Amino acid sequence: MGTLWFNGSIYTMIKEGDRVEALFSENGVIADTGNSIYLRQKYAGNISREIDLKGQTMLPGLVDSHLHLVGHGERLLRLDLSLMKGREAILNVLKAKCAVTPPGKWIVAEGWNENEWSVPELILRDELDAISTEHPIVLKRICRHALVVNSGALLAADIKEEAEEPAGGVICRYPDGRLNGLFKESQAQNMILDSLPGIDQDYIEAALSEAIADAHKLGLTGGHTEDLHYYNGFEPTYEAFKSVIEDKGMAFRANLLVHHEALEDMRAAGGRYQEGTRYIKFDSMKLFTDGSLGGHTALLSEPYADQSGTNGVAIFTEAELHQWVQKARQAGMPIAAHAIGDLAFEYVLDAIEAFPPKLGLRDRLIHAQIVRPELLERAAVLPVIFDIQPGFVPSDFPWVEEKVPAKLLASSYAWKTYLRMGIICAGGSDAPIEPLNPLLGIHAAVTRAKIDSDEAGYGLAERLTVYEAFSLYTKGSAAAIGQEKRRGMISKGYDADFTVFDQDVFTGKPEALPGAEAVMTVIDDRIMFDKNNSCKRSNPNAK
């Protein structure tokens, strides 16, 4: 028994502008598309439910190609600093939080971004100590490649003044040699984060439940998420995913990127690439090869324009990177490499060329922001996908122009160029780094401007069409996991995953895209979110 969907603008995404009048789905799969009268007659005995879309717009289910699902849930549960435009606002909210929090309890806040402040001067240990030394305080930067803590957190984590800097991590100090509370990159940040209390099964499940409920409301039917290394390790996190998505019925197609340090745990548990449960599959092995531009840890081929003493941080030596890629190949897996700077990007290409994936698989380069033209030429002939985050353009400009040498920026954030060169691109948010709402990323890809801004935007020659932008989150995301023959389009034999918007997102002005609203999210023919609960009706003639 199945569902007839009709009376809406149903865009197939097979090609630009392609629409069908109606579709019939059965057993979680699109069985047929065409004229509603024809479908009603052909499948009369099998239609148990009819969905009147009431003129609204249906697309293949939107999928975020790169996010941190548990982290997004944490952001929803924690103090959010992302919209605060100055140091004083953050310090004031921390004072208020400390006033109502029992001494000894940790205070963790998310999302500070000094580049959005009128005075981009960092908040450091001494200023946090002036607020409280009785509460361990942790402030995570929006990029999650840096955090700052107070003395209470240093004490709780047993970090001494003479602490040594780990390989691939940065521990910052005041001019007098004291720790200033700033830790960069996971190798250093974990010295703090490993001491956070309360990371148990209930905590992870609560964060996941919040995140998936939010994803449903935003029209997302799935996401490629990287969480397996950070929350007490592989097993507790994977069990939380299974509990929330499978056992508790919060259907969501979760493709789990496997952090390189969780690889052996996955294999020991019997996990294999593209295997898992009904809705949860193990995906590529995740590698971090550099950091972030905001923290001056993205690895560039030239020194930073505003800090000539550094060109970033290489998480691995070239030899170590090659060894990890070899391990992925031995496990039958592609890699998903975080590479923001052009030198990190180059190192990843070197490794892929030395150890290519098994025929039919594709590696993905996550972010692909600062890229030299000759590197694009090399990438275009390799089995790779660029996993891009369009929302980084309005977030990173104009401050990135002060940090990255101009000649490197000339060919960077070049989404249109990537597509013209035949490079498959998938679209994601990197939530909680950026907002999860896919329409914000699509708006950024089409306008390359901040919302409600009078400025023209940045790199306008690299703007995508609305169709190209939505393709990133449909066909692109499907290709990134090797599922382009069953997801990303509305076509016979494809999964019955749909996103329904309250307006036609293809006919309005691009500037109005953020004003569209998801009103229904369908996964595997199951309605997981229905804002109005007004589209359903049963078929009394069904057998």
Image (cartoon, rainbow, N blue to C red):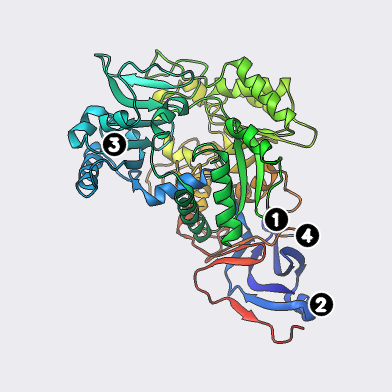
Q: Amino acid at mark 4?
A: Gly
Asked if residue 211 is positioned above or below residue 306 in the image, the reply reads: below
- Name which of mark 2 and mark 3 comes first in the sequence: 2
* Mark 4 lies on residue: 493
Q: Residue furthest bottom?
A: 540
Confirm or deny contact between disc 4 and disc 3 (CB under 8 A).
no
Disc 3 element: loop
Seen at 71% across and 40% down, the residue is 273
Callout in the foreground (2, 3): 3
Q: Position of residue 274 (x, y in %)?
A: 71, 44
The amino acid pointed to by label 2 is Lys
Mark 2 neighbour density, 10 Å: few (under 14) some (14–19) many (20 or more): few
Q: State the CA–CA distance, disc 4 to disc 3.
A: 53 Å
The residue pinned by badge 1 equals 489
Q: Looking at the picture, how far across and down is residue 232, in whole percent? A: 50, 39
Residue type of the residue flagged with mark 3: Pro
User: Badge 1, how many Cα within 10 Å: few under 14, some, many 20+?
Assistant: many
Residue 136 - label? 3
- Give the residue type at disc 1: Met
Disc nearer the start of the sequence (2/4): 2
Q: Residues within 10 Å of mark 3 (few under 14, many from 20)?
A: many
**What label sits on residue 42 in the rendered view?**
2
Label 4: which secondary element: loop
